[in-house]
Amino acid sequence: MQSEELFEITPELEELSNICVENGKIERELYTKYDVKRGLRDINGKGVLAGLTEISEICSKKTVDGVEQPCDGKLYYRGVDVEDIVKGFINDDRFGFEEVVYLLIFGKLPNKKQFEQIKRLLAFYRNLPQSFTRDIILKAPSADMMNGLARSVLTLYSYDPKADDTSLPNVLRQCLQLVALFPVLSVYGYQAYQHYYEDKSLIIHNPQSELSTAENILYMLRADSKYTKLEAKLLDMSLVLHAEHGGGNNSTFTTHVVTSSGTDTYSAIAAALGSLKGPKHGGANIKVIQMFDDMKKNLKDYKDEDEVRDYLVKLLHGEVFDKAGLIYGMGHAVYSISDPRARVFKSFVEKLSEEKGRKDEFDLYSLVERLAPEVIAEERRIYKGVSANVDFYSGFVYSMLDLPHKLFTPIFAIARIAGWSAHRMEELINPSKIIRPAYMNVHERTQYEDIDDRK
């Protein structure tokens, strides 16, 4: 048998798949009948309270005269407004991601001594075990960067003599190492892919201890290791804005669920990576870029509002792009009026678009951001407002930074490992029973039949 035959979708598999559907479909009315919180959300989209956290807070409503009203979204890391954090390190002309790593994991903003300490620790842990690059990353390159990253994380378990030690000092050490190594693993994984799948020259630059996380990503990725200060600052800001987003997002909840089983750090983080890989979670910004590429091919005039509106209607009707009926980058499970991360991004994206000579594209993004909520409200029944989310602009930023599409989601992971680490520590500090929600069986009971009597 040829190896490729093992991966074919045969008529037999198609037929067996149809049997799965026939015997596995649950009537939608039953979810309403039994008041099932599908996706752990109620009928209004509000998440079911499954735990408590001090790590971050998402605010999308305020109470006025005893009545809840939607408001501009706010995001807090350990009680500190993210927009204030960004203003702080921008005004001080320094990088912010390392500061946010400290804030999320240790629960408070670092003073100057602590800030230098976290930078030193991350620089120290940014070195892979001896021969790991050659034996693991280069010998088994992956066409999918997230799968390659998850495999590397799981393989690090084999190199760690204290892999199963779940004491807090050891888990902290493992988490700091993963925060430091995610950029290295991601970039090296991409370089291996470029070499073995795209027949490009193999380029491996060692990370530099004096550089920030954002600077090291660009330094290791680019053949000449060159980058501008603005490029590094914008990438750093992206890492800050993606570092954490409440305990209820899919990958962070996965971290809590898997940690509650008592397993090791590498298994918990690999599970979170598997969650983030999904296009409904971490892959959305790629879809935004692809959607706009298709839009630009089909629009005669970027500034013609009627033409843009017509395209957006066709998107919702599943007539263009990927036929999914979605306007990617619009809407969020919690935010309605605005996503604070998108607000922060937008002000800096315009500056970068002018510098890169792509102001026309920025204007198109702004037009879609304004028109899409109107089109969605006209075409769909919605229970809350719709606004641009962080994915709407982040993909555009990455494209202006000349980052390859294959690294978009890994960069999300490079940021979010900070939040995952904080939540893993929080789950261990405040241990619960193993997390296991209830599922109600709705299949009727049937009698066992002898095999000769079965149809």
Image (tube, helix red, strand yellow):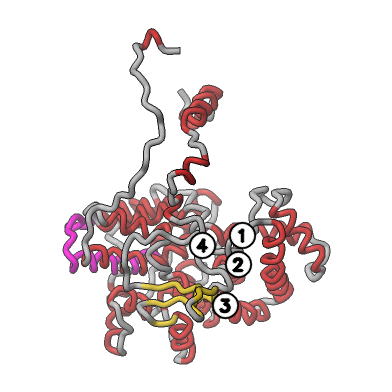
Tell me if label 1 and label 2 are in contact, CB under 8 Å.
Answer: yes
Mark 4 or 2, which is nearer the eye? 2
- Which mark is drawn over residue 333? 4
Mark-to-mark CA distance, 4 and 3: 17 Å
Q: First in sequence, mark 3 or 2: give its number.
A: 3
Stretch of the chain drawn in magenta: 158-184
Q: First in sequence, mark 4 or 1: give its number.
A: 4
Which residue position holds label 2? Answer: 385
Task: Specify the amino acid type for callout 1.
Answer: Ile
Residue 180 among magenta residues? yes
> Residue 137 in the image: x percent, y percent?
38, 53
Tell me if label 4 and label 2 are in contact, CB under 8 Å.
Answer: no
Mark 1 closeness class: few <14, some 14–19, many ≥20 residues within 10 Å: few
Which residue position holds label 1? Answer: 382
Residue 440 among magenta residues? no
Q: Secondary structure at mark 2?
A: loop
Residue at 22%, 57% in the rendered image: 160
